[in-house]
Image: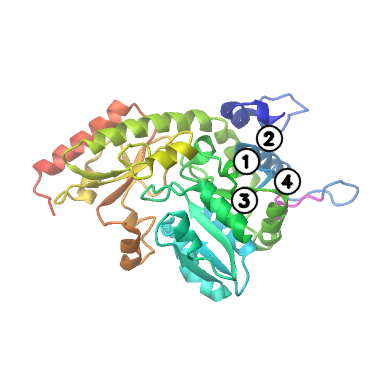
Amino acid sequence: MDNKYYGINTVCTHTGELKDTQFKGAVSPLYMSTSYAFEDVEVKRYPRYFNTPNQVALAKKMAALEHGEAALIFGSGMAAISTSLLAFLHSGDHVVFQNTLYGGTSNFIIEEFPKFGIEFSFTNGFSPESFEAEIKDNTKVIYIETPSNPLLTITDLKAVAEICRKHNLVSMIDNTFASPVNQNPIDFGIDVVIHSATKYMGGHSDILAGTVISTEAHIDTVFQMAKNFGGSLSDYTVWLLERSIKTMGLRVKAQNKNAKKIAKYLENHPDVEKVYYPGLKSHPDHDLAKSQMKGYGGMLSFELKEGLDASTFQKKLKLIKSSMSLAGVESTIITPTLTSHALLSPEDREKQGIKDNLMRFSVGIEEKEDIIQDIEQALKEINNSEVRI
C-alpha cells in the first residue's frame, strides 16, 4: 500500500502486516522459528540478522510511521540508542548531546564512551547557537531528545538538521515522548529517529522494545553494528508490538487530550509550584512545539509547593499508579531523581534542572475527571496530614 495516501490510523493498522495466505486470518501470522532454510532460498533468514518474516514486516510499519526508508527493531530502547550511536562513532570522534536527556542515555554516555575513546559534550541550552558552539573538527553526530525527559523542553528540529547539513554531521533524535503520532522528525531534516517502543508504540506496559528509522544507507550502517551486538527482538514480542501499534493513533490522541486538560488544571492549582507541558501557553517553548508537533503528547511534569512531600503525595493516589515506566493506557507517576535519572549524580541532575520534588506524570486514557479527582483527594490527604517537609 502507498502510505502517502493514508492517515496515521490506517498506517498503524495495515502497513507492514503479514498476509495469512493459508487460512485468511485477519491478523498477521506469527513465525516462531529461529532456524530457516539455507540452500535454494532468496533470503537467508536468521533472527540476529533482523530479517525474520515478522521482524521485516514490523520494520516496514515503523519506517512508514516515521516517513523513513527503512527500520530495525531492537530488544529495548537502550539497545536501539547505544547501537545507533556506536554505529556512527569511532575512537577519536566527538558527539554533541542536548543537555537534558533520558537518564539511561546520559548514564550510557558518561560511563561507556570513555572506554571507546569517544569524546562528547553537552550543550549549554537548547538554542541553535548552543549546539553550534560545541562542534569540533572531529564532531560526527548531534543527538537530541524533544520533548525531553523529564522537563519537556523543546528543541528546534529544523535548526538542528540545518546545522548538521552545514557541518556534514549525522543528526539523531530520541522521539519517544512525542511518538510518530505527534511528531515526525525526518520531515524536518533529521537523519536518524529512535524510539523506546516499550512506550507509546507498545502502550500497554507489557512489551520491551526499541526501533531505529532512517534511510536505507543509514540503517545498513546501524545493522552492521547491530548484528554483532545481538540486540534483536524475539518474534513473539515483535508480533505483540505490531498488534499494539494498531491502536497507537487512537491511544495517543486520547492521551494528548487528557494531558492538556490536566496540565491546565495543575497550572491553576494552589498546591502546585510549576508545570512542565509544551501544550501550555506558559511553556517557554510553546510556539516552537506548535510549529513542529501535531499534538503535545501525554507526558507532563510538575512540582508541588514547598512543604508538600512528593513521595507522600504519590502514596496517597488511588487510581494513578506509581510506576517505573510510562506511556501505557493507565496513568502513572514517578519521581525522576529516584527512577529514570537515579543513575546521574546530584550535581548532574541539578545542571539539568531536575529537582528532588519533580514528578513525571504519564497521563493515561482514563476519564479526565477521574484522574483529577484522584489528584485532588491525594492533595487533600497530604494537606491534612502532618507529613510535611
Judging by the rendered image, the residue that carries numbered circle 3 is: 191
Q: Earlier in the sequence, mark 3 or mark 1?
A: 1
Q: What quarter of the picture does the C terminus occupy?
A: bottom left
Which one is in front in this view, the residue at disc 3 or the one at disc 1? 3
Say whether residue 139 is magenta.
no
Q: Residues within 10 Å of mark 3 (few under 14, many from 20)?
A: many
Judging by the rendered image, the residue that carries numbered circle 4 is: 52
Judging by the rendered image, the residue that carries numbered circle 1 is: 62
Residue 43 lies left or right of residue 80; in this view the side is right
Q: Earlier in the sequence, mark 4 or mark 3?
A: 4
Spatial separation of the CA atoms under disc 2 and disc 3:
22 Å
Q: Is residue 76 visible?
A: no
Spatial separation of the CA atoms under disc 3 and disc 1:
15 Å
- In depth, the one of 336 and 93 nearer the eye is 93
Which one is in front in this view, the residue at disc 2 or the one at disc 3? 3
Spatial separation of the CA atoms under disc 2 and disc 1:
8 Å
Q: For the residues labelled 2 and 1, say whether their Cβ atoms are less than 8 Å apart.
A: yes
Instruction: Reply above or below: 354 against 273.
Output: below
| Magenta part, dominant SS | loop
Q: Amino acid at mark 2?
A: Gly
Q: For the residues labelled 1 and 4, say whether their Cβ atoms are less than 8 Å apart.
A: no
Residue 243 lies left or right of residue 269; in this view the side is right
Spatial separation of the CA atoms under disc 1 and disc 4:
15 Å
For the record, the magenta segment spans 44-51
Q: Residues within 10 Å of mark 2 (few under 14, many from 20)?
A: many
Judging by the rendered image, the residue that carries numbered circle 2 is: 16
Q: Amino acid at mark 4?
A: Thr
